[in-house]
Image: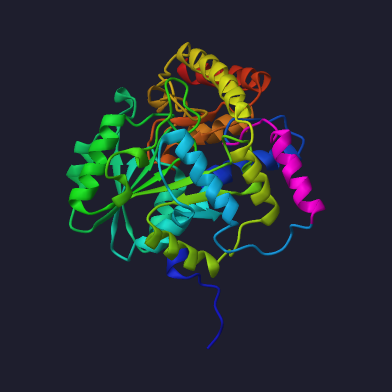
């Protein structure tokens, strides 16, 4: 029998990450000498703080370069629990913690560990691009739950309840939300936990941006009464500490589930990078003023970007309460000058104006685009000047 290059069915079910695809196109144009303003990638433009880098240097100097336990070094698992307790009032133990190769890896571990073929996973839209494909890879069935831009993309427990079925296995939450920056109301969070306990499904809370909240104190759904029975947390150091390339994330949840994730990880990636784990330890146990400083600058950028967008014809935008994205609605511009979809808009914007953004359809919402304001004020000004010119061309 001749060997074929046909991919497995599980791989054929999933797609390339649209955010990575946009980043790749922008990088290709830059390599060709083009002047591209990249507002597509969700990556802090700040350097990793010095005390974190110094911990990595010390790890290398002391030859901390060998395998570690698959679940991560014990002191880092302890530090994650301590930081989560200090920030959100939870009480996890190291046995309920797993260190992963980034937050995406934590999401993957939880979905693979708990979702069986045919299980339904409710995913509110807009959603981060990976959730749907992670569920499909596990053989699950994504159940997309739209939220309303006019309501600030708020998630209601009553809406989740209407989507429940006997096959419901998990609800994936992401607040502050990527791409909209929407927040989860504390009262709704409590209702969701009550619903999960009553109906018997898991809540997977992706807290990648949990510390990047502009007004009020950040909170975690894992601190809600009864959460220990049904809530899983996927966290990351990438955004709050400007450590995207270090690839350190974590999972928190019941010990039995964490043990299942460790079993999976021991046969896939094994341990996260040893040097990055030492850097992460310094991030979590060191001074936290770097997080506050970055958040303060993101707030200034948010106010500038939202103000600029709201002054443009045909554009409306919800003010993000967290994260570092704006998700303007461009629906009024569709149908103009050959632009029919958000993908058309993003492609034309990149090709004609050399500005990269991500189309809303990648996040399950048509008629929007995502703009990252994790860029310098100068780059934001240049990018929004070009964006405004492009919008004006379509509006005329």
- Residue at image position (44%, 20%) is 215
- Residue at image position (42%, 23%) is 333
For the question of whether residue 201 can be seen, the reply is: yes
Figure label count: 0
Out of 352 and 248, give the one closest to the viewer.
248
Out of 15 and 3, give the one closest to the viewer.
15
Residue 315, by quadrant, is top left
Query: In the visual, does 316 lie left or right of 69?
Result: left
Which region is colored magenta? 42-62
Establish if 382 lies above or below 248: above
Q: Residue furthest right?
A: 61
Residue 45 in magenta? Answer: yes
- Residue at image position (57%, 64%) is 70
Colour scheme of the picture:
rainbow
- Residue at image position (52%, 20%) is 302
Residue 271, by quadrant, is bottom right
Query: In the visual, does 218 lie left or right of 301?
Result: left
Out of 5 and 269, give the one closest to the viewer.
269
Query: In the visual, does 84 lie left or right of 376?
Result: left
Instruction: Give residue 176's position: percent from left, percent from top.
Output: 43, 33
Residue 79, by quadrant, is top right
Q: Residue furthest top?
A: 311
For the question of whether residue 14 can be seen, the reply is: no
Residue 376 in magenta? Answer: no
Instruction: Give residue 76's position: percent from left, percent from top.
Output: 58, 50
Instruction: Give residue 247's position: percent from left, percent from top.
Output: 61, 49
Instruction: Give residue 144's position: percent from left, percent from top.
Output: 30, 45
Out of 182 and 222, give the one closest to the viewer.
222
Establish if 3 lies above or below 152: below
């Amino acid at each position: 029998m001749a060997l074929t290059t046909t991919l497995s069915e599980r791989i054929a079910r999933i797609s390339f990450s649209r955010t990575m695809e946009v980043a790749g196109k922008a990088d290709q144009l830059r390599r060709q000498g083009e002047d591209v303003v990249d507002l597509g990638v969700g990556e802090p433009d700040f350097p990793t703080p010095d005390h974190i880098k110094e911990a990595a240097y010390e790890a290398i100097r002391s030859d901390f370069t060998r395998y570690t336990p698959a679940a991560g070094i014990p002191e880092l698992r302890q530090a994650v629990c301590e930081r989560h307790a200090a920030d959100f009032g939870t009480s996890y133990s190291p046995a309920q913690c797993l260190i992963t190769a980034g937050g995406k890896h934590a999401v993957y571990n939880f979905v693979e560990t708990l979702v069986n073929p045919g299980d339904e996973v409710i995913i509110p839209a807009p959603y981060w691009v990976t959730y749907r494909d992670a569920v499909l890879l596990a053989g699950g069935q994504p159940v997309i739950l739209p939220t309303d831009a006019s309501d600030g993309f708020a998630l209601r427990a009553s809406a989740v309840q209407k989507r429940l079925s006997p096959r419901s296995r998990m609800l994936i939450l992401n607040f502050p939300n990527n791409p909209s920056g929407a927040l989860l109301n504390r009262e709704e969070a409590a209702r969701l936990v009550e619903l999960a306990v009553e109906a018997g499904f898991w809540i997977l809370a992706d807290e990648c941006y949990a510390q990047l909240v502009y007004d009020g104190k950040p909170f975690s759904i894992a601190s809600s009464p009864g959460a220990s029975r049904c809530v899983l947390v996927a966290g990351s150091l990438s955004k709050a500490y400007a450590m995207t390339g270090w690839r350190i994330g974590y999972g928190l949840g019941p010990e039995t589930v964490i043990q299942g994730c460790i079993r999976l990880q021991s046969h896939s990636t094994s341990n996260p990078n040893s040097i990055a784990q030492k850097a992460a330890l310094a991030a979590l146990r060191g001074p936290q003023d770097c997080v506050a400083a970055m958040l303060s600058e993101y707030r200034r950028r948010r106010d500038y970007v939202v103000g600029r967008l709201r002054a443009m014809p045909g554009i409306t935008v919800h003010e993000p309460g967290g994260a570092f994205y704006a998700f303007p609605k461009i629906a009024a511009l569709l149908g103009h000058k050959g632009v029919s979809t958000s993908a058309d808009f993003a492609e034309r914007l990149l090709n004609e104006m050399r500005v990269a953004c991500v189309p809303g359809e990648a996040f399950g919402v048509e008629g929007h685009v995502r703009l990252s304001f994790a860029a310098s004020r100068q780059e934001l000004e240049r990018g929004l000047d070009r964006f405004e010119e492009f919008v004006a061309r379509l509006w005329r």
